[in-house]
Image (tube, rainbow, N blue to C red):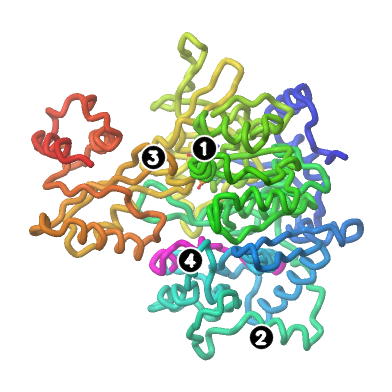
Amino acid sequence: MHYPYQITSLEQYKQQYQQSIENPAAFWNDVAQHFTWKKPWNQTLEWEFTSPKVQWFQGAQVNITENCLDRHLPQNAHTPALIWEPNDPTEHQRVFTYQDLYDKVCQFAHVLTNNGVQKGDRVCIYMGMIPELAIAVLACARIGAIHSVIFGGFSAQSIADRLYDAQAEFIVTCDGAYRGAKDIPLKAVIDDALVGNNTVKRVIVCTRTRTPVSMLKGRDVWWEDEVKKVESQQQKHFPAVAMEAEDPLFILYTSGSTGKPKGVVHACGGYMVYTTYTFVNVFQYQPGDVHFCTADIGWITGHSYILYGPLCAGATTVLFEGVPTWPDAGRFWDIVDKYKVNILYTAPTAIRSLMGFGIGPLQGKSLSSLKTLGTVGEPINEEAWHWYHTHVGKGKCPVVDTWWQTETGGVLVSNLAGITPQKPSWATLPLPGVAVQLVNDKGEEVTEANEEGVRSGNLCITAPWPSILRTTYADHERCRTNYFATYPGKYFTGDGALQDADGNIRITGRVDDVLNVSGHRIGTAEVENAINMHAGVVESAVVGYPHDVKGQGIYAFVIYQGNHSNDEALIRKDILQTVTRVIGAIAKPDKIQFVTGLPKTRSGKIMRRILRKIAEGEWQHIGDTSTLLDPAVVNEIINNRL
Ligand code: PRX
């Protein structure tokens, strides 16, 4: 069986792509008919990229959870919606049918409203990968509260900044979270984040690890107690609140080239249509298939392709609490075998890390259920692509290389599994509705190609797709300057790309000061700010360098005051500790080189290009340094490079 909007041949893709670009409103108007709306729209699309202002399905009312849950009940109440695999494989899995998930979401929607949460309020969710995380997210959407999920690896300081930016009044968290052999004390981190906070009124704490926690009277309540109250009052069904199609559904913070993460805002209607459409088409989902996306719900991939896209499509989605290498490097393959997974969607960094263990961990695991493999988050090198294709997919599963971003909400460039051609390390063709353009630094379309017909430039999108970000929370000007001002009239992705004569796109990586470490975006300015918080640090500069497993590693050049020659190792540890405290462990530099000066222009600007070359081991190709304030500093840095 196919979904009505499912593309089933290359010819059809070409035709639909053409139609969607010529008349996006007509195209998406047709796709959107296959969803449940409380009220139809007056106008499919209105837009301009100057302010910017984009409105899809204006006048319509919708609740995404009616599409994720209610509409599946008549036919598929007993279909598994969510399969939860715990961190510890000896603990029991939990399976939620659509009916179960519906019941739990309604129940928690009552808990939220009983605790004073109203439509439009911001609810911060800081939890491990347990079913209650999915339930909390969907319950927010049910009542029209705006969720802001924060990845469990972020520090108290990062949470505090996000709570402040969103003026959040509510938090849902856990006592702790399991991740491999680790036990992370989430509630204690929240307590630290709340020191000095004056917006948060209520913290709902779900029990997971039974780590002792401190509960503040009047502010903190237990999830389980609140659920019991709802049960005793027989509060069951919760009517889905009518949302305008353009009302915000959620905020998700992401790094940019400035020191402060920005709150990307997605709107209810367009996000729903686009994530579902792309889920079905990219992975070629068929009813009954089991979909396993290994991302964390704390990132956009988890929002769009563990929860919203799959659930709107009535799919069975796997939620995995643990990590790929614990208790051993065969964990993904055990899960595929156990649940007969049909679609596996993971990150190149996970593939490279598992490659390091050889094919031993794959042996004895049946992977024959697999039909589609996917990657996301960073460029995949050919070696990793072939390993994935050969050893995991046994040469018979298409690999979809999906390029997209937090800001795009859903996949913009990817092959469609088994329908459009794959090309190792190329994301290939844009999805219907996605008008790509490569531009030079002046914003002019690149027309010159090399002898193989390949053009190279900065990747822009020239018209809106339904799940484009609408704004950055409480700061629309920031949205404009970040994405729409570099090349007026176009959305600038921040990525560089190649395009071949057939239109295939290959992402070459960020062209701004954003690093991509293990598929996670981290701004160099953010890491520098964190390092500079250390009392002994005078100044620092951070750049990326190629890393075998992580894709990019973080290289920090640090000017440290005073005598550090005796105990460099200890100072390094202190700096790492500082970064962990300010941002989180994901932003810890892999290398810290102490320097006496940084290469700067006469106007005081740090020449990152030079530092990047040194970090990449390309110091022979630095080029002209005569315009520097102090050229000698470069030699010193080269001589002491790590
Ligand atoms: O540089 C691109 C890279 O990840 C960035 C977006 O990061 P984030 O917003 O965290 O979202 C990641 C998950 C969607 C992009 O600007 N990126 C993402 N997917 C790919 C990729 N680079 C190359 N190939 C991809 N498939």
Instruction: Identify the residue position indicated by label 1 in the image.
Output: 491
Q: Find residue 633 and report its image quarter.
A: top left
Determine the residue positioned at 57% across, 56% down. Answer: 296
Instruction: Look at label 3 and name its amino acid.
Output: His
Callout in the foreground (2, 3): 3
Which residue is identified by label 2?
A: 225
Which residue is found at the position 87% from the left and 57% from the top? 76
- Tell me the crowding category of disc 2: few under 14, some 14 to 19, or many 20 or more residues within 10 angstroms, Cα based: some
Q: Residue 146 magenta-drawn?
A: yes
Q: Which mark is residue 547?
A: 3
Residue 300 location, x and y as percent?
57, 51
Looking at the image, residue 212 sits to the left or right of residue 596; the answer is right
In front here: 362 or 59? 362
Distance (Cα) linking label 2 and label 4: 27 Å
Q: What residue type is disc 1 on? A: Tyr
> Pointers 1 and 3 in contact (CB under 8 A)?
no
Q: Position of residue 537 (x, y in %)?
A: 18, 58
Residue count near mark 1 (Cα–Cα under 10 Å), binned few <14, some 14–19, many ≥20:
many
How much space separates mark 1 and mark 3, taking CA atoms? Answer: 29 Å
Distance between the Cα atoms at labels 1 and 4?
40 Å
Give the side of residue 162 with respect to residue 577, left or right: right
Q: Secondary structure at mark 2?
A: helix
Say which label, 2 or 1, has the lower sequence index: 2
User: Which mark, residue 182?
Assistant: 4
Residue 52 in sight here: no
Which residue range is magenta in the image? 142-159
Residue drawn at 82 percent across, 74 percent down:
237
- Give whichever of discs 1 and 4 has the lower sequence position: 4
The quadrant where residue 504 appears: top right
Q: Earlier in the sequence, mark 3 or mark 4?
A: 4
Q: Earlier in the sequence, mark 2 or mark 3?
A: 2
Q: Which residue type carries mark 2?
A: Asp
